[in-house]
Image (spheres, rainbow, N blue to C red):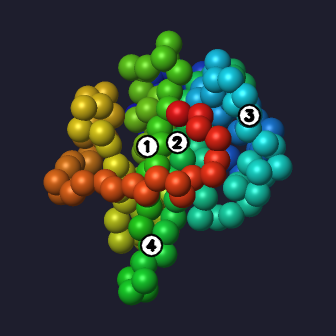
Amino acid sequence: MSPGATADPRVLVRRFRERDAQTAADAIRTLKLRGKKGAAVDEAAMRTFLEREENVLVVACAEATPVGYAVAYILDRVDGTGAMVLLYEVEVDAERRGAGIGRALVEQVTDLARETAAAKAWVLADPANLAARRLYAACGAGPASEQLLFAWSGCDNAPDVE
């Protein structure tokens, strides 16, 4: 498949920009926050997010309906040897999984990493999330280490929408 292509030719995958803030907010509401009490996506905040070149939102739409998205961040390296791209999140509508949408989303992000001459692209995955592991492997990634993720509680003032 060509970059941005899926098994369904009606699905278009592309990076969203500031002008896409309303559709981007709708995509997150539809795919991530569906049924969550008090869940909202502020369009102004989405516009601010999309204004920044280092923030990446790639969305898959089928006939103008969001069916998947990926969030990534382009990070500067302190040693100045190029950027790193963190693939932070991939979400595909449950009814559309297995159609190549997740793969097309990830490939858009890895293509961006190559275009920006990133030193590396990486993603964190729960070892128990076999679907994510299969997706990343199908896109050419492999486990890089056995490192553990540590998090600090009390640092997140945002509403819990997970």
Q: Quadrant of residue 138?
A: top left
The amino acid pointed to by label 4 is Ala
Q: Residue at x 50, y 13 (%)?
A: 95
Q: What residue did someone put label 4 on?
A: 83
Q: Residue at x 64, y 64 (%)?
A: 53
- Dividing the image into 4 quarters, which one contains the N terminus? top left
Quick one: label 3 or label 2, which is nearer the N terminus? 3
The answer for how far apart the CA atoms under marks 4 and 2 are is 19 Å
Q: What residue did someone put label 2 on?
A: 70
Q: Nearer the viewer, mark 2 or mark 1?
A: 2
Identify the secondary structure beneath mark 4: strand
Quick one: label 2 or label 1, which is nearer the N terminus? 2
Q: Residue at x 63, y 28 (%)?
A: 33
Q: Is residue 121 above or below residue 41?
A: below
Q: Nearer the viewer, mark 3 or mark 2?
A: 3
The answer for how far apart the CA atoms under marks 3 and 4 are is 31 Å
Q: Is residue 98 above or below residue 153?
A: above
- Few, some or many residues within 10 Å of mark 3 (<14, 14–19, 20+): some
Identify the secondary structure beneath mark 3: loop
Q: What residue did someone put label 3 on?
A: 40
The amino acid pointed to by label 3 is Ala
Q: What residue did someone put label 1 on?
A: 106
Q: Position of residue 147 (x, y in %)?
A: 21, 57
Query: CB under 8 Å between callouts 2 and 1?
Result: yes
Identify the secondary structure beneath mark 1: helix
Quick one: label 3 or label 4, which is nearer the N terminus? 3
Q: Position of residue 125 (x, y in %)?
A: 32, 43
